[in-house]
Amino acid sequence: MASAIAKVFLLLLIIVYCALFIQWNGEPTWVRGVVYMGEAHGYSLPLGWWILISAGVGAIVMAIATWSQWAAQKRAADSAATTVDKAKAKLQELAEKIKQQRQEIAKLKETAPDQFQPAEDQPEADEDSS
């Protein structure tokens, strides 16, 4: 709650300062935008307004630039997360396949145990070493 009050108070101070800034810089200034066929086209506003308008336009441009960078990073992170999810699914699929293969081997050993005796010169492999 105190944080919200502090933010509102800070915004009010900024607004008051902007209003006073416009009053302090109330002298009208002509800004020429385009010269077309020898005729100048522009607008006359108090200097304070020009400064605040340019700061506002700059803030909007920087917000767009920041947002575009954030969107690019988010897109890359989402792509990486998708790749990881696919890899996890493939790993789970392979783990299930290995489990089924081991069950089939166990069934075969039960049905014909004499066919699965290790050779005399080779030691028996440990099944649970993986």
Image (tube, rainbow, N blue to C red):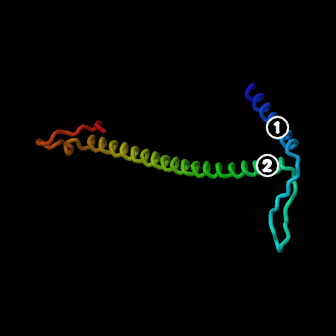
Q: Quadrant of residue 43?
A: bottom right
Instruction: Name the amino acid type tagged 1.
Output: Tyr
Q: Residue at x 82, y 34 (%)?
A: 12
Q: Quadrant of residue 117?
A: top left
Percent position of residue 56, x then y: 76, 48
Nearest the eye: 63 or 76: 63
C-alpha distance separating marks 2 and 1: 13 Å
Nearest the eye: 128 or 65: 65
Q: Residue at x 83, y 72 (%)?
A: 38
Q: Which mark is residue 51?
A: 2
- Residue 62 in the figure: left or right of residue 46: left
Percent position of residue 75, x then y: 58, 51
Q: Earlier in the sequence, mark 2 or mark 1?
A: 1
Nearest the eye: 63 or 102: 63
Q: Which mark is residue 17?
A: 1
Name the element at disc 1. helix
Quadrant of the frame with the N terminus: top right
Percent position of residue 51, x then y: 79, 49
Percent position of residue 13, x then y: 80, 34
Name the element at disc 2. helix
Instruction: Name the amino acid type tagged 2.
Output: Ile
Q: Which mark is residue 63?
A: none
Q: Residue at x 52, y 49 (%)?
A: 82
- Residue 103 in the figure: left or right of residue 45: left
- Residue 19 in the figure: left or right of residue 111: right
